[in-house]
Image: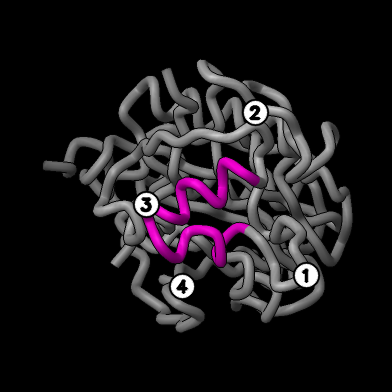
Amino acid sequence: MAIEVRIPTILRTHTGGNKTVSGAGDTLGALVDDIDGQHPGLKGRLVTDEGKLHRFVNVYVNDEDVRFTGSLDTAVKDGDSVTILPAVAGG
Amino acid sequence: MLRIDRSTFDAIVAHARRDHPDEACGVVAGPEDSDRPERFVPMLNAARSPTFYEFDSGDLLRLYREMDDRDEVPVVVYHSHTATEAYPSRTDISYASEPFAHYVLVSTREHGAQTGLVDDVVEFRSFRIVDGQVTEEDVELVTPESQP
């Protein structure tokens, strides 16, 4: 078992066009490191230089927005489903 | 070019008028790879602001799940400007992350609260926003029967 991560259109350039990738880790941060190892460049699109999630992306573990569950420290486990979506916002 | 039917065009304009002076936002979903905006989905502006819009994160997840289940994509992503022209702002450009979407901007700055007067105008323009580059495109109104 692994953790499935759904990738939005704009990031599929990093995944060879794949809509989902899978990875492993105990926290969202570790999972992001793991999938970045397989698909270099993904992490830079999700995490800032300061190590925080970009405000342009929303990440959900199962149905929960991780902003409310500890951000990159959110615990994840095999069988979880992670969804990445770009924020739809503007001025 | 954006080809959009009159009823969807009217629905977007009506939504922008209704939410004025706050910005209105939403999508028009359509079948993947079709480039046909078919299903009008007005969204709540979680920011409820005259200068900013944002889909609520829970609404966003439900919307994308629903589109996935129906093999749809956001063909149009629209929002209104309520005091400035219908052209993408720097913030709009920095957030734009659907390279295949038509970004529709509507401006209600000249709308006259649905007076029906000659100067009661809502601007409606469409853009591609890819890698920070904005390209305006023509908007063609079509009748549903004329679609291939």
Residue under circle 2?
A61
Q: CA distance from mark 3 to mark 1?
A: 22 Å
Q: Are marks 3 and 1 on the same chain?
A: yes
> In which quadrant will I find the C terminus of chain A?
bottom right
Task: Give the prevailing secondary structure in the magenta stretch.
Answer: helix
As helix, strand or loop, the secondary structure at mark 2 comes to strand
Q: CA distance from mark 4 to mark 1?
A: 27 Å
Q: Nearer the viewer, residue A36 or A69?
A: A36
| Residue B141 appears anywhere in the view | no
* B54 with respect to A22 (left or right): right
Where does the image place residue B34, in percent across and percent down from the top left?
22, 44
Q: CA distance from mark 4 to mark 3?
A: 29 Å
Given the image, what chain letter belongs to the residue carrying mark 1? Answer: A
As helix, strand or loop, the secondary structure at mark 1 comes to loop
Q: Of circles 2 and 4, which is in front?
A: 2
Is the residue marked by circle 3 packed among few (<14), some (14-19), or many (20+) residues within 10 Å?
A: some
A42 falls in the magenta region: yes
- Report if the CB atoms under discs 4 and 1 are less than 8 Å apart: no
